[in-house]
Amino acid sequence: MDKIRILLVDDHALFREGLVRLLEGQADLEMVASCASGEEAAAILRENPLDLVLLDYDLGKERGFEFIARARNAGFKGRFLMVTAGMSDAESVQALDMGVSGIFPKHSSPGVLTEAIRKVMSGETWLDQDSIRALVEATKHPGRPAQVKALTAREKQVLQGVFEGLTNKEIGARLGISESSVKAGLQQLFHKTGVRTRSQLVRIALEERQAGRR
């Protein structure tokens, strides 16, 4: 099995070094590089094939969002997992709207991070309770019109599975359909909602729930 190639971007040297030691001990993970700034990270991206960027939200002179935009413009197709000491509700929502695969709080157990990495690399979303609360609050005061149009009953069931953090296989088992049928349903959801990632679909699911309560 190919290893997951990782870049860590965090401006706190001690945290960065501790995380590198933790991840280097995992047989399925490869720490390609670590750095403290978006500028350094951009240079590393140009020179190395990467699957995942572990990105601190607050990089001192810049925010992680700036690097995400720069990396996407440069053609980076991998995933982002935000590793943060704290983000506001609005920032958490913005991160998901930008397509990050998850938000991991620094106060969480370091060992849980390896689980989060594997989950997002399997195409799932990693959200802690604070991030979910931020999304719930955002749906109470939406800043944009609802994006969901005419979902079928099956698509709503798949969307519910995404919201609960289930894998495609688990969703298929729950609904009694094949994994390929789940994937087809997800493609329809992406098309109808206009989003690109499962993390963005989580927000759509919350908007659907909120609309159903009105």
Image: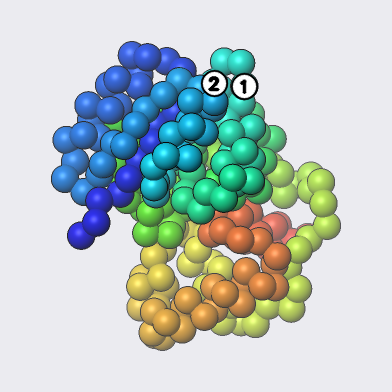
Q: Position of residue 10 (x, y in %)?
A: 44, 23
Q: Is residue 167 visible?
A: yes
Q: Foreground: 99 or 211? A: 99
Query: Hey, which residue is sitting farthest front in the picture?
Result: 47
- For the C terminus, give its image quadrant: bottom right
Residue 88 marker: none
The residue that disc 2 covers is 59
Name the residue at 72% across, 49% down.
139
Q: Position of residue 112 (x, y in %)?
A: 30, 38
- 3D distance between C-alphas at marks 2 and 1: 5 Å
* Image side of residue 2 versus residue 174, left or right: left
* Rendering quarter of residue 180: bottom left
Name the residue at 29% across, 36% down.
31
* Image side of residue 75 versus residue 116, left or right: right
Query: In terms of secondary structure, where does tag 2 sit?
Result: loop
Q: Amino acid at mark 2?
A: Leu
Name the residue at 64% across, 40% down.
69
Instruction: Say above or below: 139 vs 89.
Output: below
Q: Is residue 116 visible?
A: no
The residue that disc 1 covers is 62
* Rendering quarter of residue 39: top right
Circle 2/circle 1 CB separation < 8 Å: yes
Q: Position of residue 155 (x, y in %)?
A: 59, 77
- For the N terminus, give its image quadrant: bottom left
Q: Amino acid at mark 1?
A: Glu
Query: In terms of secondary structure, where does tag 1 sit?
Result: loop
Q: Position of residue 177 (x, y in %)?
A: 41, 85
Q: Foreground: 121 or 1? A: 1
Q: Residues within 10 Å of mark 1 (few under 14, many from 20)?
A: few
Name the residue at 39% across, 47% down.
49
Instruction: Say above or below: 139 vs 70.
Output: below
